[in-house]
Image (spheres, rainbow, N blue to C red):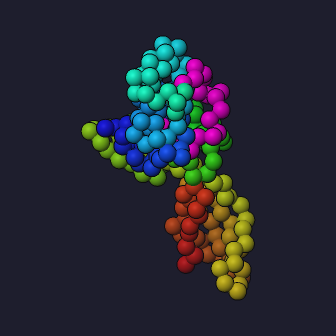
Amino acid sequence: RVVDKMLEIAQVGPKDIVYDLGSGDGRIVIAAAKKYGARGVGIDIDPQRIAESKVNAVKANVTDKVKFLRQDLFTSDFSDATTVTLYLLNSLNLKLRPILLKQLKPGTPVVSHDFHMDDWEPDQKKEISGHQIYLWYVPAKVAGQWELKPGKTPVQVTLEQKFQKLKGKAKLNGKEVEIAEGRIRGTRVSFTVP
């Protein structure tokens, strides 16, 4: 049930490439292929878990859609992922966080079972059968100075970013005001100017 909810909350579909980092017995990648038609890659450093995953993929008849790699997930390239799933300790999630933010395209969902990312607050959080599921969307980098043209008069905006949260100031007709409700979801940026 937890695996299904993780894939459901990430809205996995047939066009997706799901990477499971620390994939264990391969159940997440196999479920993504079998139930949602996605392709999948499991990465684990333990050769026994990789062997077990391959056997499980044969049993599930999804060997054409999945592969399992014996690699260190901290040095792996998963930049082509459209979804990343995790079931790692908080400390490993934190160590992996800068790699995820660097490698993944803005908007890529990252889903973790039971373990969070400290001050990177989830975009969504669900509970199922006593387990927490966290979902983050990799935010675009938008900090800096921008000129927006919502009408005839341009608005100068200076944005500060902490993951998907924004704060900053907007300058219109010589008047400077704090922006409110600043948020990023992938490549979508929203805020209000009072």
Q: Is residue 32 above or below residue 167?
A: above
How many labels were placed on the picture? 0
The extreme left residue here reads: 129
Q: Is residue 92 visible?
A: no
User: Is residue 47 one of those drawn in magenta?
Assistant: no
User: Is residue 89 one of those drawn in magenta?
Assistant: yes
Quarter holding residue 101: top right
Of the pair 26 and 146, the residue shown nearer to us: 26
Q: Is residue 6 above or below residue 20?
A: below
Using residue 36 as the reference point, say whether residue 151 is left or right of it: right
Of the pair 183 and 106, the residue shown nearer to us: 106
Of the pair 70 and 179, the residue shown nearer to us: 70
**Residue 147 in picture, x, y percent from top left:** 73, 72
Q: Residue at x 71, y 84 (%)?
A: 153
The extreme top residue here reads: 48
| Prevailing SS of the magenta stretch | loop
Picture quarter with the N terminus: top left
Quarter holding residue 87: top left
Quarter holding residue 167: bottom right
Q: Which stretch did the figure color magenta?
A: 68-91
**Residue 8 in picture, x, y percent from top left:** 40, 46
Picture quarter with the C terminus: bottom right
Q: Residue at x 66, y 42 (%)?
A: 102
Q: Is residue 58 visible?
A: yes
Q: Residue at x 68, y 70 (%)?
A: 157
Q: Residue at x 54, y 57 (%)?
A: 185
**Residue 45 in picture, x, y percent from top left:** 55, 19
Of the pair 148 and 94, the residue shown nearer to us: 148
**Residue 25 in picture, x, y percent from top left:** 43, 22
